Amino acid sequence: MAREESKALLDAFNKTTACYHHLVLTVGGSADSQNLREELQKTRQRALELAVTTGARLTVALRDKGLTTEERAEFERLWVAFSGCLDLLEADMQRALALGAAFPLHAPRRPLVRTGVAGSCSGVAARALSARSLRHEAERDFDRADLQELEQEVLQVGKMINEMEMKVNVPRWTVQARQTAGAELLSSASAGASSAVSVPERTGPCDLSKALAATVFSAVLLAAVALALCVAKLS
């Protein structure tokens, strides 16, 4: 039961980390917006919650002295997969911190043209500009607070990685994979080949006349190419 729960937690953490990775790639691009930054924050917090829960569950399991050899090997594989996902999450959080600081959503802008218009409508325009400035100010506060929170969470993940290495000593190079590298690609390729229409193979003796004709044609083609090269050099 503990192994199945650990697998489910790791699967959820893996998917959340992958989602966060794709969201980080759009920061600073044409799809960047306030909604994206808020979605980044929610996904990051969800990933951190899953990281804490999964790490605690795997730590308790690996420190259990009553595990069999097979169970310990399985939990060690889960531990290596979890630590790899955690490293990727830390790298993406650092990338999001750098991109968020380099591409603020609501940088202060100065008007390029001052019309000097004044009159009875100036009060309405002033109130509209005041409401807009308040909204932008709130959004800027969100950006600053989110970057500060993200900076603290990056340190938290780094501390979590160090504590994991001290609590459980599972060198990655000692863990054996359950299948060879690229097995999934090979299986999918073989499945695609089996689903395709098979071409019947000819098992009978080859046709000597056709083979001779192919040889003569190749010789003639090579002679023509040689002759063309000679003409090109002489000209």
Image (cartoon, grey):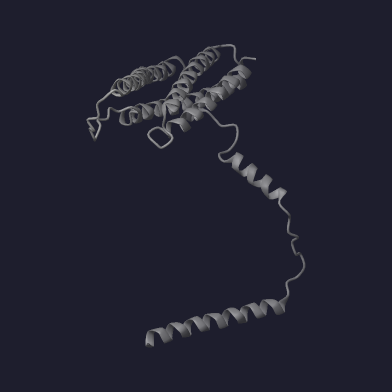
- Which quadrant of the figure contains the C terminus? bottom left
Measuring 61% from the left and 18% from the top, which residue is drawn there? 3
Residue drawn at the location 58% of the way across and 18% of the way down? 6
Q: Residue at the right extreme? A: 204
Identify the image quadrant of the N terminus. Answer: top right
Residue 233 lies in quadrant: bottom left
Residue 132 position, x and y percent, is 35, 22
Quarter occupied by residue 159: top left
> Which residue corresponds to the image point at 73% horizontal and 75% vertical from the top-left?
207
- In the rendered image, the residue lying farthest to the front is 120
Residue 143 x/y as whole percent:
35, 22
Front-most of residues 110 and 208: 110
Estimate the x, y position of residue 155 in percent, counting from the top left: 35, 18
- Image coordinates of residue 230 in percent, x first then y, are 42, 85
Residue 42 position (above or below residue 18): above
- Of 79 and 142, nearer the camera is 142
Q: For this rendering, which residue is in front, 111 or 118?
A: 118
Asked whether, in this view, residue 47 is left or right of residue 148, the answer is right
Q: Residue at x 48, y 22 (%)?
A: 43
- Relative to 191, is 176 on the left or the right? left
